[in-house]
Structure formats: structure tokens, C-alpha cells
Amino acid sequence: MFYVYLLASKHYGTLYVGVTSDLLRRVFGHKSKAVPGFTARFHIDRLVWFEPHNSVEAAIRREK
């Protein structure tokens, strides 16, 4: 299973969309700021939406 997910920094804040096969691990990575980058710099770590897909191709199409 693959997931398209949307994170936000705060109410009406900055948004980030991504694709992952392990939603819990990925969201934890954003919350702990394990990888420096866009989401860490702008404090984007609130999961506001996700959608499951059976294939990575379908998830990537939906992300775009």
C-alpha cells in the first residue's frame, strides 16, 4: 500500500504533499525533523490528510 499525504505547518500555514509506503514512519520523520530540508525548516509536521493507493504509480499520479 502506498499513501499520498498532506502536511501543514499550522492553520492556514505552509503545505507539503508527499508519497510514502510507510505513513507512520514518514510522519514521525517529519515530526522529529530527522532529515534537514523544507519541512524541517518551515516546521511542517501536522498530518492533515492522506489517501491510500494500491500502486506507487497511482500514488505519484495523484500527488502530481
Image (cartoon, rainbow, N blue to C red):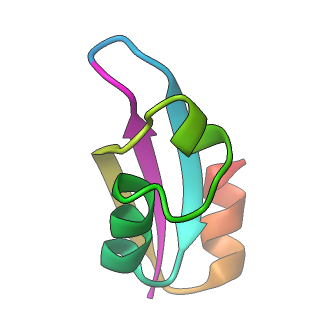
- Up the image or down, 13 lies above or below 58; here it is above
- In the displayed orientation, state which residue is furthest to the top: 12
Count of numbered circles in the view: 0
From this view, report whether residue 21 is shown above or below residue 35: below
Placement of the N terminus among the 4 image quadrants: bottom left
| Residue at left offset 54%, top offset 74% | 20
Residue 28's image quarter?
A: bottom left
The boundaries of the magenta stretch are: 1-10
Report x, y in % for residue 42. 53, 28
Main SS of the magenta part reads strand
Q: What x and y, as percent, mark residue 57?
A: 72, 77
Horizontally, residue 52 falls left or right of residue 21, namely: left
Asked if the magenta segment contains residue 9, the reply would be yes
Q: Residue at x 30, y 75 (%)?
A: 24
Q: Is residue 22 left or right of residue 55?
A: left
Q: Viewer-proximal residue, 13 or 43?
A: 43
Relative image position of residue 4 (x, y in whole percent): 50, 61
Q: Is residue 40 above or below residue 30?
A: above
Magenta stretch containing residue 51, yes or no? no
